[in-house]
Image (cartoon, rainbow, N blue to C red):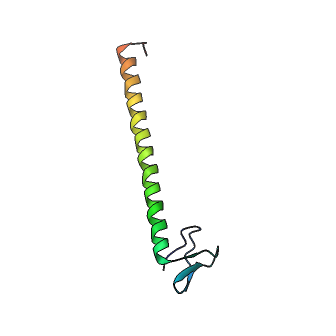
Amino acid sequence: MPSCPDCGEERMTKHTPYYVCTRCGLSFKPTEIQKARDRAKRELQQIMTRDEEREVERKRRKQRDYRRWFEGRQDD
């Protein structure tokens, strides 16, 4: 049984050819539910990728700052 892509409700009733959410009342065709899930997965993957890139940059900065401190440099 699919869950509502909008509110996440697990209980959806089937009114051919639609699924209707019992919580928010939205109705979706099964293909629309799958498209919404796929879109959400892509957006989540993009967010995760950006977070990983930020973490890599933070580590580079930390290593660079440590190297400068170790070498006794004060320049940029």
How many marks the image carries: the answer is: 0
Apparent side of residue 60 relative to residue 36 in the rendered image (left or right): left
Q: In the figure, 31 relative to 72: above or below? A: below
The answer to which of 71 and 21 lies nearer the viewer is 21
The residue depicted at 41 percent of the width and 44 percent of the height is 52
The residue depicted at 36 percent of the width and 18 percent of the height is 70
Residue 15: % across, % down: 56, 86
- Name the residue furthest bottom: 16
Apparent side of residue 25 relative to residue 41 in the rendered image (left or right): right
Residue 74: % across, % down: 43, 12
Q: Quadrant of residue 13?
A: bottom right
Q: Quadrant of residue 42?
A: bottom left
Residue 41: % across, % down: 44, 60
Residue 37: % across, % down: 47, 66
The residue depicted at 49 percent of the width and 76 percent of the height is 2
Q: In the figure, 7 relative to 45: above or below? A: below
The answer to which of 1 and 26 lies nearer the viewer is 26
The quadrant of the picture occupied by the C terminus is top left
